[in-house]
Image: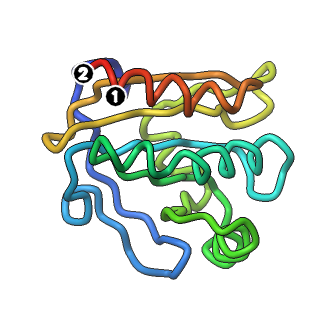
C-alpha cells in the first residue's frame, strides 16, 4: 500500500502503552490526528523527537490535533518511555512492524533502520500531511505545526 496526500489512512488496531487496544476508526475523535512513526524508545533521536512533541503539545491542541507515536517497541517499553519523559500522548506498539509493512513505509540509512515519518489526518481519515526526515527530529514538529496553522 502506498500512502500519499489525499488517500485514506487505513484502519489499524494496536496496543497502547497501557495495554489497551487502540482502533483508529473507533478511538480517534478529534479534528486532526498526528501519527508519527519512529524507530525505537530511549534512543537519542527518538527521545529528542518525543520530547519535542511533548513540549509543543499545547500548540497542537490549539488546532484540535491529537498525537500518537508508533514504534515496534512493546507496551511495557512504551510505558517506561512515556513515564520517564512525561509524554502526554499515547504510544502504540507495532509488534514486529506489521503496520509499517502493511503501509509499505520506507526505511532509512540504506534500509537498515525503520523510517521516521509523520502524518496528519483529518476526521475522515484523509491524509493531509506527510513529512519524513531521519535526522532532523524537531522538523517533524515545526513542519506539522506550520501545516496546521495554514489550513
Q: Residues within 10 Å of mark 1 (few under 14, many from 20)?
A: some
Left or right: residue 117 compared with residue 124: right
Image location of residue 136, percent across then percent down = 73, 24
- Are the two marked residues, 2 and 1, in contact with CB atoms closer than 8 angstroms? yes
Which label belongs to residue 40?
A: none
Q: Residue furthest right?
A: 44
Which residue, given by chain and number where applicable, does mark 2 sit on? 151
The total number of labels drawn is 2
Quadrant position of the N terminus in the picture:
top left
Residue drawn at x 43%, y 64% is: 14
Calculate the distance from the C-alpha at mark 2 to the C-alpha at mark 1: 5 Å
Q: Secondary structure at mark 1?
A: helix
On screen, 29 above or below 123?
below
Which label belongs to residue 148?
A: 1
On screen, 92 above or below 144?
below
Q: Residues within 10 Å of mark 2 (few under 14, many from 20)?
A: few
Image location of residue 24, percent across then percent down = 28, 56
Q: Residue furthest left?
A: 124
Residue drawn at x 54%, y 45% is: 56
Q: Secondary structure at mark 2?
A: loop
The structure's colour scheme is rainbow
Along the viewing direction, whichever of 85 and 76 lies nearer the viewer: 85
Q: Quadrant of residue 49?
A: top right
Residue drawn at x 59%, y 54% is: 54
Quadrant position of the C terminus in the picture:
top left
Along the viewing direction, whichever of 23 and 122 lies nearer the viewer: 122
Left or right: residue 150 compared with residue 115: left
Left or right: residue 61 compared with residue 96: left
On screen, 53 above or below 94?
above
Image location of residue 120, percent across then percent down = 36, 34
Amino acid at each position: 500500500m502506498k500512502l500519499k496526500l489525499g488517500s485514506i489512512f487505513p484502519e489499524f488496531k494496536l496496543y497502547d502503552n497501557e495495554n489497551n487496544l487502540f482502533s483508529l476508526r473507533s478511538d480517534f475523535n478529534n479534528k486532526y490526528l498526528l501519527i508519527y512513526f519512529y524507530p525505537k524508545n530511549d534512543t537519542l533521536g527518538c527521545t529528542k523527537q518525543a520530547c519535542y512533541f511533548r513540549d509543543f503539545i499545547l500548540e497542537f491542541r490549539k488546532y484540535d490535533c491529537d498525537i500518537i507515536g508508533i514504534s515496534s517497541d512493546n507496551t511495557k517499553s512504551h510505558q517506561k518511555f512515556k513515564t520517564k519523559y512525561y509524554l502526554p500522548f499515547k504510544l502504540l506498539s507495532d509488534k514486529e512492524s506489521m503496520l509499517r509493512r502493511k503501509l509499505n513505509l520506507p526505511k532509512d540509512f540504506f534500509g537498515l533502520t525503520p523510517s521516521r515519518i509523520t502524518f496528519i489526518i483529518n476526521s475522515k481519515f484523509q491524509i493531509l500531511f506527510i513529512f519524513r526526515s531521519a535526522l532532523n527530529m524537531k522538523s517533524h514538529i515545526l513542519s506539522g505545526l506550520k501545516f496546521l496553522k495554514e489550513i
